Structures are given as structure tokens and as C-alpha cells.
Image (cartoon, rainbow, N blue to C red):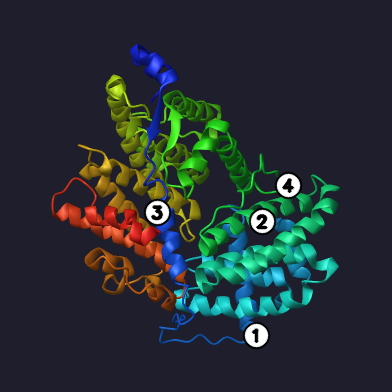
Amino acid sequence: MFTQASLRYLSPFQNIIRMTPFQFENSTSNVIQKSFFRIFTRTIESRQNPCYHQPSPRMISVTSAEIRSIADDLIRLYFEQINPKLPLLHKPTFLRHYQSLEDPLSCPITLAICVNTVSCNRQVLNYNASERRQLGEVYYNKCKEILANIFDDPKKKLETIFTITFLHHFIIFGLVRPAEGRRLATISYLLCKEVEPSIATNNGSPLSILFKRHYYHLQHVLCLLDDIIDQSTSRPYPSISQLEKIVDEDQVTCAYIDTYNHMLRLSQHPCLKGMTVWTFTRDTNARMFSLERIIESDRTISEWWSSLPSNLRIRDDYYAEDIDKAVSGCKSMAAVMMFAYLHANIIQVHTCLIMPRPSSDDAQSSDEILNQVRNKALSTVLRSCDLVLSAVTNIVTSSELDIPVFTFQFIARVIHAFISVSKCPKSKVPASLQHKFYCCVQSMRAQMPSDNQIPPSISPINTYLSTSHLGDVTVYRRYPFPGIALIEDILATFHEQLQASFTNNDDSPSPDFVNFTLSDNFIQ
């Protein structure tokens, strides 16, 4: 790591460190994000796109009484498995409300929770993905009918805001209707602006705290939808310094809120915040940074880790000899998630250093330090990738729900790092690390519903690798949850490419997949 000891080690080059700006190539920095958005966008471009059809031989048929009974189970699952990790409702308050309802299916928030749970939970009531999609549509259509009647009701503004929050996942990844999602999100945003002044007068109350969580979540959803629909990031990403806790929230929920607050503290540090914007912007032009700026970012990450409470640090030394075993055996998902977040940020910072070049014409004077910087960065990136994969495998195999969204972000960082390393002269991703990635992705795919997976024979990505032309991307819409099918297809393709590289005894990621992710014809 580039700590104080590293600075002393590089002492002959102190003037270069402080004074010489280097240009760091970021051409691969957001290709995974851009690849996903581009394919996703193409699935909705044509009005003639084939819509989802029911491939299962069994069409579920449920009575109103059965729908209500299933709703009871979905509410229970939501509060057991989803809300503690993403606490958008106060459990005691909502359950009292739910139990007081004469007809729970008349409550839009209840219906929206059912929609959310059906679309997020891999194993719901032993239904497969096709049957869960049907259930989701039943609850969604009932919820939409009620929403249409309460949009203009001044007494129902918060109820409308909360309801819309729980519908986003199904609309985007199930129905693949981002325009509809953005219309609802915009309505919710306008309602938030209307109620914000009155909510502020009760600052610190449970309702105020929940409102802030929904508002923050909503702004992220709007940014995502802008990316999908407009290929634009003009909307500023939301900023929040800290999530508040409600006094009687359970211990697990409070632990996750503490975890998120520590993450927010690091992500909003001036050093890291600037690099995050640079790494994930759609602008692919190289940016100017001094080496000192990047070293400072690294020091910030190290100090942040040291400041965490002991229950969130698996080890004080995050590169300890036994750290891999400790991560794999850790039972605290909050601690494992924090560890993965730490190393994902280390990957982010050090991947920038893999292909540096001096910004001035006189490059010869900087060659020696550039080589040292590159070698240290390569070693750090590969080791952190290894540890992220250990953490993600633990999270995936321990979770009772669908794979948490943040794990895909961690995996995207690893893929980005692999591509960057493969583009660096005389650098390779070790076969042992490729195998670990292969096993991690295999674990992730095993958690996904089998009837929502694209066969390689009709995969648009596989078609691109063999013909250089992207196949029929509307194929994703023939599956129950097209957005998840796309994510699974990207993982499956990289998974198979790595398997092929093992067969060929190759020590680097398949050039076909690297070319796929970097293709200007594809991502533009």
C-alpha cells in the first residue's frame, strides 16, 4: 500500500510525486455500467419488441382469499429478510396498521410490498420465476388502480410516496418499463417537495426519518432511470451525510444503518468523492491527477478502516496472512459487506495507477517512478480482487434472498480490474484468481432462478462474440424478469469465457470478452 512507508521508499522521487501531474487512462472505467445500460436500452427501443410470455406449463390460478393469504406470507418475508437490510418501513408501526386492516388488499403500501418481495426474493412460496412474475402482476395491477385514485388526495401524499418506492424494482427489472417507472418516480419526487417543509417541522420523528430514507432512495432511482432512458448523468447524485435510526428499530436493522453510515462517510470524503465521479462518469477522456492526490486517497481509505468499530473490522490488518480464511468464515454479513466495500474502493483507486503516463513531453525522467507505481498498483489490485471475491462468495452463499444489489457493483469492480490488467503490457490475471472468480460467479448464478436464465445458444452477447454483431436483445423480454436475465447473461458469458481460458491453459481473460466490453460499436 502507498502508506507513509511507501512514501519513504519513493523518497528519491518526492518532487515528482508532489509536482508532476500524470495522466491516468480511464477508457475502461465504466464499460461494465455502459454495457449494461446499452443492452437494457436496446430492449425497449423498438415498439415491436416481443413481450414476456408465460413459458411454464402451469398457469397459476389463485382466488382472492389465496391472494390475501399469500400476502400475509410475503409481508412476513419482507420484514424478516428485506427490511432489516433496507429499512424503508418501521416494522412495529406498519404491522399494527396491517393487522388493523379489514381488507389488506385495499392498502397500496401492502400491495407494493408484495410486488417488491415477489420480484426480489428468489424462493417465494416455492413458486418459480414465471409464477412469481404472474403474482407480481396481480398485486401490481391492484396497486396501480388504487394509486390512480389517491394521487391527488392531499391526505395520501406520504402513502403515495412510500408505495411508489416499493414498485420500482418490479417496473424496471420485471416489466422493463423505465418510462413508466420514471413517471411514477417524478410524481413521487414532486410530492416529496410538497411535504418536505411540513416533515421538517417534526425532524427526528419516525415519520421524518422514514421520509428521508425514501427521498434519498428515490433520487438514486431517478438517476438510474435517466441513465437507462436518456444515457445521461446530468441529474446530480443525491448527497446525504448520515442515516438516522428510529429509537426502537431492531438490532439487525441498526447494525446495517451503522454500516451504511460508515460507507457514506468514506464515499463522501473529498478525495474519494472526486475519484468516484471520475471513475463512473460517461466521459471517457483521461483526467489529470497528481500522484500525491491518489496516494492521499489511499491513506484516507486506510484511516477510515482503522476508525471503524471492532465488530465491523474482520481484522485490523486487511491484508493479514489469514484474512482470506477469516472473511470466508465470518458470520456477520455487515462486517463482510464492509470488508468488500473497503477493497472495492482500493481497487477503484489503484486501478487508476495501472496505466499512468506523464502529462508532459519529457516522459523519460518519470519512467522509473511510473514503473514502481505500476508494479505496486498491480499487486494491490490483484490482491484486493481476490479478497472481494472471498467476501462476495460468502455473502451470496449465506443470503436467503436474491443476490444483494451491491454485490453486482463489487463484481463489476473486479471485472473492470481484470480488463485493465489485461490491457497493461506484460501483465496477466493469475489463473488461480480467474478460477476464484469462476467459482464466485458460479455461486451467484446458482442463486438465480433457473427458468430466468438465457441459454448460450440465443444469448445476444454470445452472438456478438462469434459474429461481432449484437444479437436480438429483445430475447431478454421473453423471460419473467428481463433485467435480471440480462445481468445473469453478462455473468454467464464472462463465466464461460474464463472456463474456456482454463481449458486453453491461458493465464489472461479471454480477449473476446475484453473486446466485447470495450467495443465502441457496442457501448456508444
Left or right for 471, reference 346: left
Q: Position of residue 163 (x, y in %)?
A: 69, 66
Q: Amino acid at mark 4?
A: Ile
Residue at numbered disc 4: 246
Tell me if I can see residue 448 in this picture.
no
Residue 177 versus residue 18: which sits nearer the camera? 18
Q: Secondary structure at mark 4?
A: loop
Q: Earlier in the sequence, mark 4 or mark 1?
A: 1
Left or right for 211, reference 512: right
Q: Position of residue 474 (x, y in %)?
A: 41, 75
State the separation of the CA atoms marked 2 and 4. 11 Å
State the separation of the CA atoms marked 2 and 1. 27 Å
Please tell me which residue is depicted at 33% across the width and 27% down the height of the picture.
361
Is residue 345 placed above or below 100 in the rendered structure?
Answer: above
Of the residues tagged 2 and 1, which is closer to the observer?
Answer: 2
Find residue 32 and name its label. 3
Residue 495, picture quadrant: bottom left
Q: Residue lying farthest left?
A: 504
Please tell me which residue is depicted at 65% across the width and 62% down the height of the picture.
165
Q: Amino acid at mark 1?
A: Ser
Residue at numbered disc 1: 64
Find residue 88 and name its label. 2
Q: Earlier in the sequence, mark 2 or mark 4?
A: 2
Is residue 12 placed above or below 103 in the rendered structure?
Answer: above
Q: Earlier in the sequence, mark 4 or mark 3?
A: 3
Q: Amino acid at mark 3?
A: Ile
State the separation of the CA atoms marked 4 and 3. 37 Å
The quadrant of the image that shows the N terminus is top left
Q: Position of residue 369 (x, y in %)?
A: 31, 21
Q: Amino acid at mark 2?
A: Leu
Left or right for 217, reference 40: right
The quadrant of the image that shows the C terminus is bottom left
